[in-house]
Image (cartoon, rainbow, N blue to C red):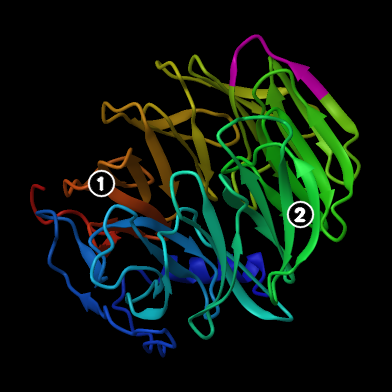
Amino acid sequence: MPSRRAYLAALAAMAGCTNRSPDATPTATPSETARGSPTPTSTPTNGSVPVRWRHETPHEALDIVSLAPGADGPAVYVGSDGGSEGADGHAIHAIGLADGTEQWRVSLPTPAVTSPVYAEGEAGPRVYVATRVSSETAELYALDPSRGTRVWGFDAPARRRVYPMGATGDTVFVGTRDDDVARSGEAIHALAAEDGRERWRVESGDALATGHAVRRNTLLARTPARLRALDVETGAERWRIDSPTVMYGPAVRDERVFVGYDGTVRAVGLADGRERWRRDVDFSISGVLTPHAAASTTVFVADRAGRLLALSPLDGSTRWTLSVDTDAFRPHVVRTSERLFVGGQGVYALDPVSGERAWSFTPGAVDVTVHASTTVFAAVGRDRMHALDPASGTERWRFAPGPLLAGPATAGDLAFVGVEGTVYALDGSRTASGDS
């Protein structure tokens, strides 16, 4: 299976080549239908936005645009929207980052509702995605990206939705959820990658859409007000954390797991659940986060009223505090080698050691998510995208095509978004050629 290090190296290579014309050899397409070839262009689609390539799909609308490992390196995964099928029904597509060439396509009976999860083991590579059958039920499909085919499917119990919670080389873990948000009445299923047979099942509460992780031989499963650590081979519970209110996290860093609830932040050992430290805070917690970066050694705790605390993962002491003028603060944090970027009411660029603010970008919207590498991309809901210079915060361009944006996914200087049935690779290293 491609390691996380190899995956990040491939993305770093993308970051280094974004100012050059793509010269990759197009990948052979083993898909069931191989249409929708890319149309490289330098013509802006939104007045002045530089486009590296665009890829037309047969769908009228797209709902999923995400970045994940693939059989031939990182790929942009694209899923059709449930609102209208288009000419060819529903499908998952894998598109090459460099030039937009379709690597494979797998048709689906219903639209995908979760971003694909990739894993590779003895049975070969697998991509797992949940689809929506109706407003109340869903299915999970295992796809073979090397052949572009469906391998097996898992039908959720009646009136249940399903969420892939993570995968190893030989197993995918799937949680179920009904209309209630409860600590019991549902199950976590461990399904064999080869044929979908059930390896084990454990009782659980309603599976949440996010907050799960597989680390070493442990599945961290988040359900309402509960975090459980399960053995990936047997499903045996190693430890659990129950909270009296909504739980935030888990954030995982090295061998520690961080959660927050009801004015308390806790650090526990990944292997044994033993508490390493506990810290009380005088505010309403709205997030516990650790950015995915090799240089990151900080745990961030968000205050709903607009504060962000940078804590030491060793003892929970405060290193610095960011305060912004907002309420309902639910930030997410991205770390590069030089700066920390916080998305929330706007985008805030900070020194990761001191917390000193270098610049801020506030487009007047409440919900801004930030994606950063060699370009900073700010996504304002599903309405528009901004490309910002990481050193100064200067806006290079904005992309506001009108219809709801799908995505974004980012790598280096490229942002991948879906508009109606088209995927665009937007070049953040270039400035706009005119007013958008």
The answer, for residue 302, to whether it is visible in the render is: yes
Provide residue 319's location: percent of width, then percent of height: 66, 25
Q: Check disc 2 and give the amino acid type.
A: Arg
Quadrant in which the N terminus is drawn = bottom right
Tell me where residue 324 sits by quadrant.
top left
Is residue 281 in the magenta section?
A: yes
How many marks the image carries: the answer is 2
Q: CA distance from mark 1 to mark 2?
A: 35 Å
Q: What's the magenta region?
A: 278-285
Q: Crowdedness of circle 1 by 10 Å Cα count: few (<14), some, many (20+)?
A: some
Please give left or right for residue 117 compared with residue 229 in the image. left
Q: Which mark is residue 304?
A: none
* Magenta span contains residue 246: no
Location of residue 51 in the rendering, given as x and y in whole percent from the top left corner: 22, 64
Residue under label 2: 215
Q: Residue at x 67, y 31 (%)?
A: 224
376 vs 29: above or below: above
Where is residue 45, by image quadrant? Answer: bottom left
Let me know if residue 256 appears in the view: no
343 relative to 196 in the view: left or right: left
* Secondary element at image label 2: strand
N-terminal of the two: label 1 or label 2? 2
Could you tell me residue 221's position as x and y percent?
72, 44
Q: Nearer the viewer, residue 25 or 397?
A: 25
Q: Give the residue furthest to the front.
A: 158
